[in-house]
Amino acid sequence: MALTSIKFLPGVNKQDTAVGAVGRWVESDNIRFRYGLPEKVGGWSSLTLDTIVGASRKMHSFVDLEGNRYVAIGTDKFLILYFEGQLFDITPFRSNNAGVQTTFTSSTIATNSTSNKTCTVTTTSAHGLEVGDIILLNSVTLPSGTGLSASDFEDKLFQVLTVPTNTTFTIDSLNQATGAVSTGGAMIVEPYQSVGPVQQTYGYGFGISQYGGPVSGALTNTLSSGINNSVATIPLTSNAGFPTAGTVAIGTELITYSGKGTNTLTGATRQANGTTATSHNSGAVVTDASDYSGWGSAVEASTVTLESGLWSLSNFGQVLVATISNGKTFTWNSGIAARLTTRASTTTSGFETAIATGVGNPTASRLTLISPTTRHLIHFGTENEIGDATTQDDMFVRFSDQEAINAYAIKATNSAGSQRLQDGTKIVGSIVAKENILVWTDNALYTMKFVGAPFTFGFEQVGTNCGLIGKNAAIEIDGVAYWMSNNGFFSFDGTVNSLACSVEDYVFGDCDTTKGQQICAGINNLFTEVTWWYPTSNSNFNDRYVVFNYGESQKVPMGNWYTGVNTNSIRTAWIDSLIYPKPYASSYNSTASGTFPSIIGEDGLGRTTLFEHEVGTDQINPDGSTTALTSTLQSYDIALQQEQPETFLAMRRFVPDFKTLTGEIDITIGLKDYPSSSIEDSTLSPFTITSSTTKEDTRGRGRYASLKIENTGAGEKWRFGTFLIDLQPDGKR
């Protein structure tokens, strides 16, 4: 018989049945579809010899006025700068609301023994450190008898090992002591700003083990006026939905009440369940905590989520603006001479963000961004009362005066302002789009558009039941936003659209949506791809990815989608090829140790590696070694006899059809009698194919056949065309 040509549609289809998806691909890894044809993805190469300590979850590139290009990298421990092939630590020190750096200037040190390197540091006041925190030591003098040198500690970073008391903590020394000294010496302890945990945890804190707490996502409102620590009537903006009698939480205080008035809760008993009565400012968030289980009362489950340590990164001209999720905002000025040895801070000259004399940035915001056209600094999920973290409202938006990122007082003479969103329980993410700013809650999408005085920005809800799964799960390109929700994929081009997805069940059937803040979306405009890297239920970190090819999806049923699980391909942050000619990305290994910054006693912080993508054919590691980039593509079953599927056919040979083939690949032909039968490889499979292979003889018999293409070696590259096979009838038995 003549050769039969079988051409596959682009993309992977995991939604249909084996028979219904004839002519489609079902499995993929490290491939993409370009001009309708599948090919192996491009390789990537390490950007630096060093790897970064911790997990990177945000990268941001920008250019200063002199044309210098930078990448800011935010991890769960550090704020790192990439500049001209080198890494610089610009992590801010811990500071108070006025921007004053926290230091312990009269601290003493003791070498605990000569059998280990553990030392105990005693501070003059409560240090507030936790296990795993990072500290810098300076101005070190040591007590005699230790056998150690001050240089073992001077200007070095240490990880806190234990915290025996609120004025003591332990660290490992660089070298082994020769004598145990109980106390003495002096040093300055400079704690690094805490960012947050490396992974998102669901069911955390209150409600675990012997502890109780209010239900996450309970009804909330705000105080209509301030209250002192003894009043028995609680004034609310609205008491609608609150039970007739119950318990509310304001900050850390629990208050029981026995009745309701006109937008009030009456008969209040303060400091319930052993909490401390305190004053609360107008606008403070009031949470219905009627289902609270007291201290020592076990509850079956918790819905409290401890979010992973995240950064918001943007730039105000040549000034980097960095906000820790649910924390403070810091700035770093690339325009100063000593920029590479200067840390981000709340007191950057001309760009202060510290609270001082009634001005400055909020101290607790879920995220921030700069409006690039109007130059406002916008805080999302922030404080009603600036400087009072207890008034943080997850649905509250506040923006600075134009061109003044530290001015928030709302006046007739400026454009500062605020707005509270309504649909949802928390603002999850925000990005700058073509004509406006897009703001997602966990349930809805809003547009935020500059309208001028007196309101400055107008907010419009444009979608519901389309909330964002995680802060970094949305991306925009060419005026269209794409994002991942808890139950599907969406786009916005002026209208919210649900994206038809041929791998939807596969993705959401095993995606751990309780770790949504770890999900990373990235645009690769070189190949019109949006990729989401996400964690599955069996992993603490991202371990799968799904790709939507927005440039080649119009003519494919359910869109042009493909997936992958290759460990080397998993990313935690991504920036597209805009400032740099190729995309940059980061990967995280939780079991390895980073080399930058150098931390004495570092343990369990993991390692981030930076890569430049679309370079070569393989993975080039920081040490210069090569890891082969493997790829796989598997088809569904093909009915060999379309007109009479009950007839068996004999496959005599196939002809490889590749647009590009460097090195070699393996092709395996799978055969079946029925769609539900097990696949049996054809005789002589797998077939090793090179650019000089003209045909392959095979002996196979069946009603259905499938095709698998894979490469395993370094330096290999391929692009597949059409499946050409030689078939002849072989009876019905």
Image (cartoon, rainbow, N blue to C red):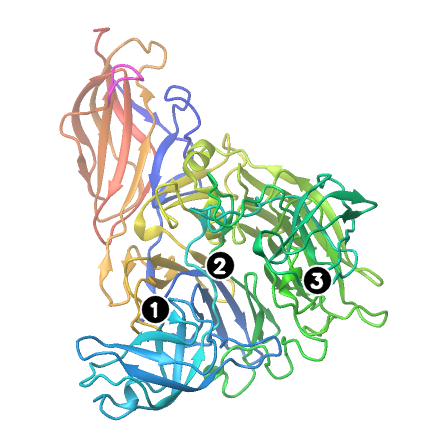
Q: Which mark is residue 118?
A: none
Nearer the observer: mark 1 or 2; the answer is: 1
Q: Does 38 appear in magenta?
A: no
| Picture coordinates of residue 494, whole percent (x, y) | 69, 45
Q: What amino acid is at disc 2?
A: Asp
Secondary element at tag 2: loop
Q: Which mark is residue 576?
A: 2
Q: Are marks 1 and 3 in contact (CB under 8 Å)?
A: no
On the rendered structure, is 524 left or right of 597? Answer: right
435 relative to 238, above or below: below
Q: Are marks 1 and 2 in contact (CB under 8 Å)?
A: no
- Work out which residue is located at the far top of the displayed protein and give it: 732
Distance from the alpha carbon under mark 1 to that under mark 2:
41 Å
- Residue matched to label 3: 229
Give 563 or 418, whichever is nearer the viewer.
Answer: 418
Q: Which residues are magenta?
A: 672-678
- Residue matched to label 1: 162
Q: What amino acid is at disc 3?
A: Asn
Nearer the observer: mark 2 or 3; the answer is: 3
On the rendered structure, is 711 left or right of 38? Answer: left
Secondary element at tag 3: loop
Q: Earlier in the sequence, mark 2 or mark 3?
A: 3
Q: Quadrant of residue 314?
A: bottom right
Query: What's the magenta bit mostly, secondary-structure-wise?
Result: loop
| Mark 3: few/some/many CA within 10 Å (<14, 14-19, 20+) | few
What is the quadrant of the C terminus in the image? top left
3 relative to 643, above or below: below
Secondary element at tag 1: strand
